Image (cartoon, helix red, strand yellow):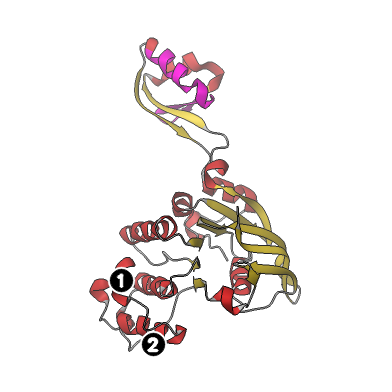
Amino acid sequence: MTAVIETRGLTKTYGTVRALDGLDLSIPRGGVYGVLGPNGAGKSTLFRILLGLIRPTDGSASVMGGAVGDVAAMRRMGSMIETPRFPPYLTARQVLRWLALEHGIAGEVDIPYWLDRVGLTEAADRKVRGFSVGMMQRLGVAGALLSKPELIILDEPTSGMDPPGIQEMRALIRSLANDDGMTVILASHQLLEVQRVCDRVAILNKGKLVREGAVSELTSVGERLRLSVSPPGKALELLGARGAADGDAVLADVKRSEGPDVIRALVGAGIDIHEARWVGTDLEAIFFTETGAVQAPETIHAG
């Protein structure tokens, strides 16, 4: 895999605080990559270094094959870090025109297209002072996409959005990766959304990388076959030590290759199977295990 971001021994200290502590990270080109961590994990510091906003204390980082701060490399990037702020007297359309002028690409940008991609067509000529947090997030994403970057960093893009808005943003992010060929780096405290949209994730804790890998591989550990059956007691008796109750359902600790045989055996014993699906460890459980976080999922923030 070709890497779009590489860090080696990346360290950033603020007095006695080590925001990043010798971070080694390689983010491959293509797809959606999640960067997770509890408050103080170093995520925001990492992004600011990659964008050339602050300098590391030690170590190195490269972006798009160039050094951090290299103009040619940076022009191939887009970003939205934290909640965006725009002049309140401008409309959404005017904000994007202003940003395009700042980028020197005003004559090349199809502003109605990007307003439509982020779901702001109907609000295009409304002043942003009346925008909700979720609408400002959408506008910030549109601004980050104006130059059609190869790599985009999005920090909490679904903040302040209702469930339909979150679903729309998830679809947009996947579309950017699948249809536009962008590499999307996503930070979010909504771990279920991360699990749904990301191809790979890195979990940071106290400035260090504690877990990295494909979401499908990380969540397949401890995979079991969940069966909604009746009567469940008879199914548990048949499964023996390989079976465990899970509410009204049964969990079978078997390999995928054994699944069909198990189902046939249950049906042959007169047990009705209403649903059968494979379940594994979810990203939330992995996050808690790796970081020792004790907060409820709503309060976790990749910081």
Percent across and percent down for residue 250 are 44, 26
Query: Looking at the picture, which amino acid does disc 2 mark?
Result: Pro
Judging depth in this view, the residue of 278 and 102 nearest the camera is: 102
Please determine whether, in this image, residue 185 is positioned above or below residue 231: below
Quadrant of the snapshot with the C terminus: bottom right
Percent across and percent down for residue 97 are 35, 84
Judging depth in this view, the residue of 293 and 226 nearest the camera is: 226
| Secondary structure category for the residue under label 2 | loop
User: Quick check: is 286 in the magenta stretch?
Assistant: no
| Secondary structure category for the residue under label 1 | helix
Residue lying furthest bottom:
89
User: Is residue 81 in view from this perspective?
Assistant: no
Query: Looking at the picture, which amino acid does disc 1 mark?
Result: Tyr
Look at the image and give the residue range highlighted in magenta. Answer: 244-267
**Residue to which mark 2 is pinned:** 87
User: Quadrant of residue 169 in the image?
Assistant: bottom left
**Real-space Cα separation, disc 1 to disc 2, in angstroms:** 22 Å
